[in-house]
Image (cartoon, grey):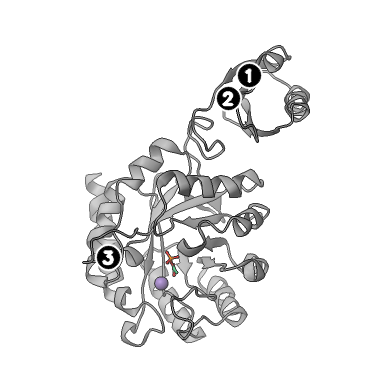
Amino acid sequence: MLVVMKNDATEEQVRAVIREIEKMGYRGVPMPGAQRTAVCIIGNKGPVEAARLLAMEGVKEAIPVTKPYKLVSRETHPDSTVITIGGVKIGGGEPVIMAGPCAVESEEQALTIARFVKEHGALVFRAGAFKPRTSPYSFQGMGKEGLKVLAKVRSETGLLIVTEATDSDNLAVVNEYADIIQIGARNMQNYSLLRLAGHLKKPVLLKRGFAATIDEWLMAAEYIMSEGNHRVILCERGIRTFSDNTRNTLDLAAIPSIKEASHLPIIVDPSHAAGRRDYVIPLSRGAIAVGADGLLVEVHHDPAHALSDGMQSLYLPQFEELMRELGRLKLFL
Ligand code: PEP
Ligand code: MN
């Protein structure tokens, strides 16, 4: 249930409502809006007795929330959320391009790619220092040394950094270095990791699990938000289907579905969806055309020698072409 406060409700009245909700055995999360504050009730298993709350000073109305997720729901937060990080706005209308290699391999590799993607319009540099690999024998990432390289990329280029935390052991150090903490597809339902990320102050990029429904994905975001971190960016990266022409199947319908169900920004990763670089530009066009708030794209200056995901990494000139095409697409949207 959402308790909507009157326009002129005082902070003390909001606090009193939260205390009353706590007395009922639930939690009340204040959600300040442009006009008025609402308090979202979480932790209730069934319907909430609204009369007690409606009788309180400053309370305008109580609206039942029909969805299992609350804080992520557009029902509780009709305006789209815009996440601002160091001057970059995600969800603010202009698609944000996050680009870089799958993994940090060396300082020279990261800086070469970062300088190029920055020059052509990327605002965020992506690269994993901790890599969740299907095989234990594959390159697992440079770890903390990789994070130090990413810090250098940020200071030299001014790009923001998104990089993945793969478990609760490396979450703290990733939080130290990253501007956006990525939680990967394999961890989308790692609820203890989600809760820990919910205690952090940095935005979280939450990728969709290979076999997750939209509701399961939104419930995963709810885990993060219910711990207090409301800055969640969703990322569609393809799901498992019977179709085997691509590594995964990009679910473009997820973008309008998420936009309807949730106020959170959503971006698209066409690289892990396709698994092959020649499909990345067409899928990117599609993603932006259906309303994605940005892209997460793998780019490498020498994909043939990349230590991971070379097949799906764009060559540098292809990234330039992608940005040119997106510019043209903007003229039609
Ligand atoms: C990645 O972005 O490098 C990655 C491992 O992605 P996913 O979790 O979507 O497989
Ligand atoms: Mn990758």
Amino acid bearing label 2: Gln
Residue identified by numbered label 1: 7
Instruction: Give the distance between the C-alpha atoms of the residues marked 2 and 1, in whole angstroms.
Output: 6 Å
Q: How dense is the environment of label 3, judged by Cα within 10 Å: few (below 14), some, or many (20 and up)?
A: many
Q: Position of residue 314 (x, y in %)?
A: 30, 73
88 vs 7: above or below: below
Q: Are marks 2 and 1 in contact (CB under 8 Å)?
A: yes
Of the two numbered discs 3 and 2 on the same chain, state the one appearing first in sequence: 2
Quarter-wise, where is residue 308 in the image?
bottom left
Q: Secondary structure at mark 3?
A: helix
243 vs 130: above or below: above
Judge by depth and name the residue closer to the eye, 15 or 98. Answer: 15
One can see residue 230 in this view:
no
Amino acid bearing label 1: Asn
Q: Secondary structure at mark 2?
A: loop
Q: Position of residue 174 (x, y in %)?
A: 62, 68
| The C terminus lies in quadrant | top left
Front disc: 3 or 2: 3
Judge by depth and name the residue closer to the eye, 23 or 124. Answer: 23
Residue identified by numbered label 2: 35
Residue identified by numbered label 3: 280
